[in-house]
Image (cartoon, grey):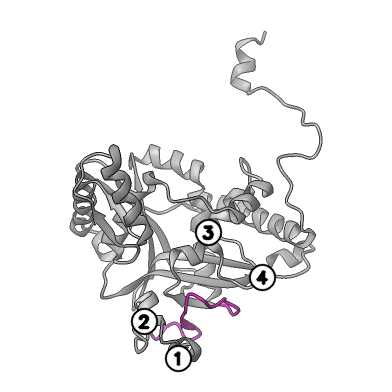
Amino acid sequence: MTLVIDPDCLACADCEEIIGMDPYRIANLGPDAPNAVVHQVCPRDRITEPGVYENVDPDTYHRDPIEGGSLSSSGARKLLPPGCPALYRWERDNPPPPKPHFDIGHAAHKLILGSGPPIVDTGLDNRRGNAWKNTEAEARAAGAVPLLTQDYAMVTAMADAIRNHPFARYLFDPDHGRPEVTLAWQDTGNLADGGAAPVWRRARLDWLPDRGTGRLIIPDYKTCADADPDALARACIAHGYHLQDDWYRAGCAALDLAGPEARFVFVFQEKAPPYLVHVVEMDHVAQRIGAVLNRQAINLYAQCHAAGRWPGYADDVTHLQLPAWYENQYGE
């Protein structure tokens, strides 16, 4: 296996302070990943080579650290209906500010994965008045996630529920994997459809387990309101989780991190007591649909990128049809 540490990054006296990097730590993907390349990345660097990159902070990842631009799974989903290229481009160029309703998920990620922004128990029980306003501003300025006291207790209980789950607790074992790993690879599939150049793709795994003797299982953690199977099926359609499944498996395969036998699972957890955990795997139909939609998004991205044009929903008049359920109310 080839393990690469950027010597320029190691020479940077600021790296350890900036990203908490131990310059002598080399991650081991295991003997079954002979072509894997692991990079420790200074946040000021740009990614120019396919590989596995550690210590890419979330802001850098979402701003796109790849030279020349790349497409992520969330970007691919924004390109497709009900989104469109114009919306994708706007959100790429105008990243939204932190949204408080995401704080619970970010905090749970921190406690479960051991990676992410620090969590601050503000000691407050409501978000009213200057006490919250000033405390929140101070925490966010320091790159932390501010939580009400009851929310801090909640995410702590959620992390305990994961550790007590008979299967999920093994998926995020800190002794056998690494959190928040960035993958970067080039996709040539669009060339068969007339594309002029490969498309850079990127992914950020919640957890990359070490390669062992058994089948590799790559988990992704998500909080939710309802982890019932029917509710999760609806959430999959609404949020495109089947596209994410295919996207992440494609990245692992492209970088020789996992073979076709590898499994990708979602670890869903409810945000209300008793914080139930449900580990699910997409079936083959969902995976095939995800692969088809991802290919459409990649080809669309390549076309827009080459033309320098990111259209909206339509450039001409659209013939709008009412939903069938509504028409049926007035049909013969």
| Real-space CA distance between mark 2 and mark 1, rounded to the nearest whole angstrom | 10 Å
Residue at image coords 47%, 86%: 9
For the stretch drawn in magenta, what is the main secondary structure?
loop
Q: Is residue 143 above or below residue 317?
A: below
x%, y% of residue 307?
79, 59
* Quadrant in the picture for the N terminus: bottom left
Residue at image coords 29%, 50%: 135
Q: Which mark is residue 11?
A: 1
* Quadrant in the picture for the C terminus: top right
Where are the magenta residues, as a range? 27-50
Question: Which of disc 4 and disc 1 is earlier in sequence?
Answer: 1
Residue at image coords 78%, 68%: 196
Mark 4: give few (<14), some (14-19) or many (20+) Cα within 10 Å.
few
Q: Which mark is residue 68?
A: 4
Q: Is residue 289 magenta?
A: no
Q: Is residue 254 above or below residue 112?
A: below
| Real-space CA distance between mark 3 and mark 4, rounded to the nearest whole angstrom | 24 Å
Residue annotated with mark 2: 16
Question: Which of disc 3 and disc 1 is earlier in sequence?
Answer: 1
Mark 3: give few (<14), some (14-19) or many (20+) Cα within 10 Å.
many
- Secondary structure of the residue carrying tag 4 is loop
Question: Which of disc 4 and disc 2 is earlier in sequence?
Answer: 2
| Real-space CA distance between mark 1 and mark 4, rounded to the nearest whole angstrom | 25 Å
Mark 2: give few (<14), some (14-19) or many (20+) Cα within 10 Å.
some
| Real-space CA distance between mark 2 and mark 3, rounded to the nearest whole angstrom | 34 Å
